[in-house]
Amino acid sequence: MSKGRKSRSDGRPTIADVAARAGVGAITASRALRTPDLVSPALRARVDAAVAALNYVPNLSARALASKNADVIGVLVPSLTHSTFTDVLRGIDDGLAGTNLQMQVGNTRYDPAEEERLVGLFLRQKPAAMIVSGCAQTDTARQMLTQAGCPVVQIMDLSDNPIDRIIGFSHARAGRLITEHLIAQGYRRIAFLSGWMNTRSQGRLMGYRQALAEAGLSEPPSVHSLPESALAEFTEAATPGERPILDFARPAFARALLRRTLQQAPDIDAVFCNNDNLALGVLFECAAQGIAVPRRMGIAGFNDLDFTDATEPSLTSVLTHRYRNGMAAVTAIRASLAGEDPGPRVVDLGVEVMARRSTDRHGLLAPPD
Amino acid sequence: MSKGRKSRSDGRPTIADVAARAGVGAITASRALRTPDLVSPALRARVDAAVAALNYVPNLSARALASKNADVIGVLVPSLTHSTFTDVLRGIDDGLAGTNLQMQVGNTRYDPAEEERLVGLFLRQKPAAMIVSGCAQTDTARQMLTQAGCPVVQIMDLSDNPIDRIIGFSHARAGRLITEHLIAQGYRRIAFLSGWMNTRSQGRLMGYRQALAEAGLSEPPSVHSLPESALAEFTEAATPGERPILDFARPAFARALLRRTLQQAPDIDAVFCNNDNLALGVLFECAAQGIAVPRRMGIAGFNDLDFTDATEPSLTSVLTHRYRNGMAAVTAIRASLAGEDPGPRVVDLGVEVMARRSTDRHGLLAPPD
DNA sequence: GATGAAAACGGTAGCGCTACCGTTTCGATA
DNA sequence: TATCGAAACGGTAGCGCTACCGTTTTCATC
């Protein structure tokens, strides 16, 4: 069967085989598959029949090499741990439905150097587009992305100076809005609780500080972590030999944080938690200590995860449009690839304060059904 | 500059340019980059210098075409919504660290037909390996994977008859263990609560039924969903024009499920929830209704998500090794690709019943610190 | 029926890389 | 010094596809 020692083929049918069987030229077979509108229906049918008969599977590497770009869109997220970014992935995935684009995911672990490495790696494939999280890229990464020759969308943050295009929301504004809400509800000693600070958390903290300052309030000692000695309990090695992971968004961690905060500042009457998981832990710690929520203590979270409307009392949070963000990035990319107008370079999706019972200090909300 | 109308190059340096600058043959430059051990240190240095000087970026499509396989591993998961499978992704991602393999993610949405489509799509790239979830593939998908010519690992389930290799755990056994735990704690009217049944949920349900039968207990009416009229409340369209999504794992949904269950069977004294999110909702519904947990009602979840140790009372659950599962799949794949022994074809990672206060009916656990 | 433009199809060559094998160099051994 | 095998390097050709352009066919128009 094999022609001889020179053939490097693995025996799978190629488009030439399809073309031969259909009695057409290879390039015509290619066209019949790629742009069926440009060939006659009869020919299209013959080619399709040949494809089916031979069980032909196109080789994407060859296609990518010849056409100089791959049908892959690279997505860089800082974490796969929490649902924040997996919601984004879901939005991207849904946005990609009906296209032949595939999504390739890289986890930067909140490390700009790792992000830079991944950008370089991804760009080797000449992806159709890139989606990266936030705007804290290294100079090198920025430059690589600028010269990538494909649409680049930054997401989940906002900036006046996007690499190419940015779709997201302002964390500073979000932090400010939720803090203003707490103040409006009558809270005065509002602490900021956070497991660990990244660029976006910093933005939220800034907004929180602005709101406090404008209301003439002082900032209670914010607790962002525990002393080394206490951290061990929350550090786990998933697999023997693996580096231990400290999961800062674990509710149990939040409970410890709140205990520590209350030691340092027993007079606080509200906490703005950097995310809903922390808020959930705080809620339970208050329950355990018999601290009345929302009367004695207001609790606000961030992201509006799916449990916020089901807790007891329900949890005030800031809705961030994560799914929509991923979807919007893909929409812009698709428009861009199709030569259409991808819309403005900076898009603010906004956020929404979801006021619920955990901050309803004066019982203004309607009673539960 | 351009040689003429015949060049289809985009001007980026190729390995030939690198080779020319380093004063070596193209193939040698390739070797210096791919297998540095096989060339002299001096030459390696010269090639590296040329790469740096030209800012050379290798073209992965060309490499894939020439070497007949791509440095991509395809991962098919049924959902990106809940942390169950994103934990797996994290394990895979961590397992891939230090390799030049990239992970490409596809979301099958629990639909075998979609899974089949994605398998076909992924295989077009000749991936280095495939990871698929569960063992409910269509015949066609199974066949395609069998003939893929690359390692295939099924995860998050168990079977005697893997496509190539399966690493996971038995859902039936897990369901059985947790139900036995509930029975051992003295619960007798144990309901099974589930938002929606997929293949793996079915396995859990089977195990639950086995345990009940063996203990001579009858099964209270299990509630797996709500009547159409009530579903609307939990259905949301993320974006205008998008198909609405019914999120069956929302805690708020669980609260409604529990209410309905209590109507149909007021005498139940425990619920085994299909996942922890549901259990969380049940916990809050009990709190709202003043149902004492664990005395009047035992609650068990599934997966042991990160909040189970922080709820009040803490939540009994079944620890499934999701991260480890992803990691183990990659470990087997790496061994296989390296020509080493990838271990047995069927690996049971087991599960662990995490007994906590939500099922500690008789106060046998040590008091909280 | 001649004309011209659009539609349909095809040949050639090249995308950038590496498999395959061949050649050269070098140092150890006899 | 002759011999030989391993290490180091290189030429050729091919991976499977599509861009680019050229040729043929079709069909409406004058």
Image (cartoon, coloured by chain):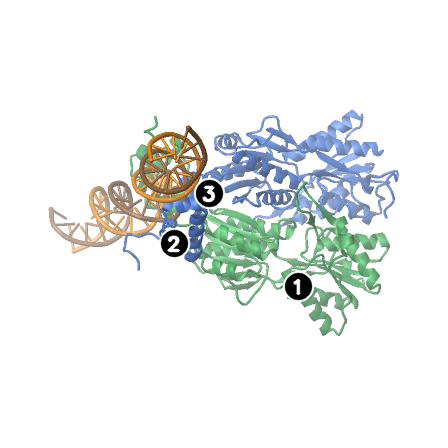
Chain colours: A blue, B green, C orange, D brown
When asked about the image quadrant of residue B242, the answer is: top right
User: Foreground: B353 or B232?
Assistant: B232
Q: Which residue is mark 2?
A: A13
When asked about the image quadrant of residue A31, the answer is: top left
Residue pictured at 65% horizontal, 39% vertical: A324
Read off the chain for label 2: A
Residue A330, placed above or below residue B295: above
If the image is split into quadrants, where does the N terminus of chain A sit? bottom left
User: Foreground: A32 or A147?
Assistant: A32
Indicate which disc residue A53 carries: none
Q: Which residue is mark 3?
A: A35
- From the top left corner, tell me how far across and down residue B179 is, in percent: 72, 66
Q: Residues within 10 Å of mark 1 (few under 14, many from 20)?
A: some
Q: Amino acid at mark 3?
A: Thr
Q: Which residue is mark 1?
A: B202
Asked if badges 1 and 3 are on one and the same chain, I answer no
- From the top left corner, tell me how far across and down residue B71 is, in percent: 45, 47
Residue pictured at 36% horizontal, 46% vertical: A25
